[in-house]
Image (spheres, rainbow, N blue to C red):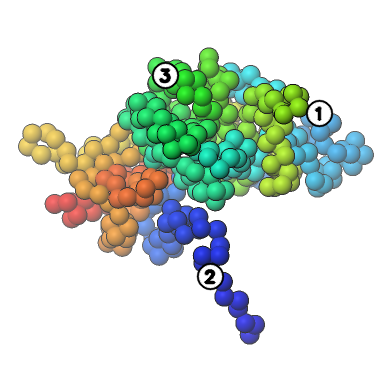
Amino acid sequence: MPIALELRAERLNPALADPGLEVMNFLNEVAMRFPQAISFAPGRPQEQHFELAAALPYIERFIREADLRPLHRADRHGIDALGQYGRTNGIIGSLIARLLQRDDNIVAGESDIVVTVGAQEGMCLCLSTLCGGPNDVALTIDPAYIGISGAAKLLGVRVAGVPCSTTGVDLDALGNTVAELARRDLRARVLYICSDHANPTGLTLSMQERARLLQAAADLDLIVIEDGAYSYFCYDGKPLPPLKSMPGGERVVYLGSFAKSIFPGLRLGFVVADQTVVRANGQTCTLADEMSKAKSLLTVNTSPIMQALVGGLLLAHDCTLREFVQPRVRAIQASRDAMLAALEARIPRDPEGHRAISWGHPSGGFFLAITMPRPIGNDDLLACASRYGVTWTPMSYFRLDALPSRQIRLSFSYVTPSEATEGVDRLARWTQSAFG
């Protein structure tokens, strides 16, 4: 057998030693150890809605109907041209611009859009272009999707958290954080937030909170990175406008994804970065142009084949996904409703009518946060999985400090209504044994 070379961990990227980067591996390990458990851990849609085989003909439709000028030599080679390296910023920017206008009232031009390898690459592009200095700091709501903080750490970007209430960002804390960083000769450059049905808390900002946040961003000279991953999944009332579409939206860089609305295996997302950049020589360009430089060295380009599939689908649906996503919206809403009903029925009240365990009512998205009587950790998760056959995610996994939290995250997007009901029954039995 060949001799394996031994490397010292301290010679690798120091961010790899961060416990937060082990979260996904740990959850995968739990899933493999307890394959029969009902899992409230995965933040993903169900495969029954993907219709992958039916989607493949959209590639040919794109070749027939789309503007192929961004696709190199398509006039000569047709569909085979999709096998070539593609334009760095993508070949479906014009279709995405129409989609944004129709579904979200976001006005953007083709040149303002960078098509990315999932929204995760979009986060990396935002961080690498907007936080390039040694004293730059990326702010994120805390707790938040670990992809943004993990990417920042791997890229060597300082990251700081801003707490949220049940209604929105703590703007006093945001201002204090920016001021404290300035006292340490550090500069807060961006603030990451998911304004609709956030992962992991389920938080949706009200119209008032959206306006207040945009004003605070202007006052504090921050660029807001708005993650729109769950914008199509609104179950109560009408969808609210993205920050990007509101007055003050010029400070917003918008991240979009087709992972939830079509299917995750596409690995396709986009960034809307229409801000004007003034270069040292006085010439101007868009922020998307600058991101293109970073993307060319990060992923070279986004798969033209996958872009053609999405492009053909958008053409087939007149560049709107509102109706297309409705079957899965209804299915996930049914699972949310089943989970909420089961919690109401199975979590007991004391004689005064109070509960030691509480939860919110997410108006959309994939997630629900539950607050327990004491901090919850990995041992609790393993005990619940092994003895009661249900898994979930400790909220500490999404906190920058990784300290134990009293909250856990339940995902209702990957279970049926009956599984949601049975899973909550098992969870309730675990809570009774764990908390009395």
Between tags 2 and 3, which lies in front?
A: 2
- Choose between 382 and 224: the one closer to the eye: 224
Instruction: Give the amino acid at mark 2.
Output: Arg
**Circle 2 — which element?**
loop
Residue at (51% x, 65% y) in the render? 10
- Choose between 71 and 238: the one closer to the eye: 71
Instruction: Give the amino acid at mark 3.
Output: Arg
Residue at (26% x, 45% y) in the render? 406
Q: Is residue 22 above or below residue 86?
A: below
Furthest toward the left, the residue is 351
Indicate the quadrant where residue 132 lies. top right
Residue 212, numbered circle: 3
Relative horizontal placement of residue 155, taking residue 76 as reference (left or right): left
Q: Mark 2 highlights which residue? A: 8
Indicate the quadrant where residue 95 lies. top right
| Sequence-first tag of 2 and 3 | 2
**What is the CA distance from the residue labelled 3 to the residue labelled 1?**
40 Å
Query: Whole-percent x and y of residue 387?
Result: 27, 61
Q: Mark 1 highlights which residue? A: 67
Between tags 1 and 2, which lies in front?
A: 2
Query: Whole-percent x and y of residue 175?
Result: 39, 27
Residue at (33% x, 54% y) in the render? 390
**What is the CA distance from the residue labelled 1 to the residue labelled 2?**
52 Å
Q: Is residue 123 above or below residue 284?
A: below
Residue 367 in view of the camera: no
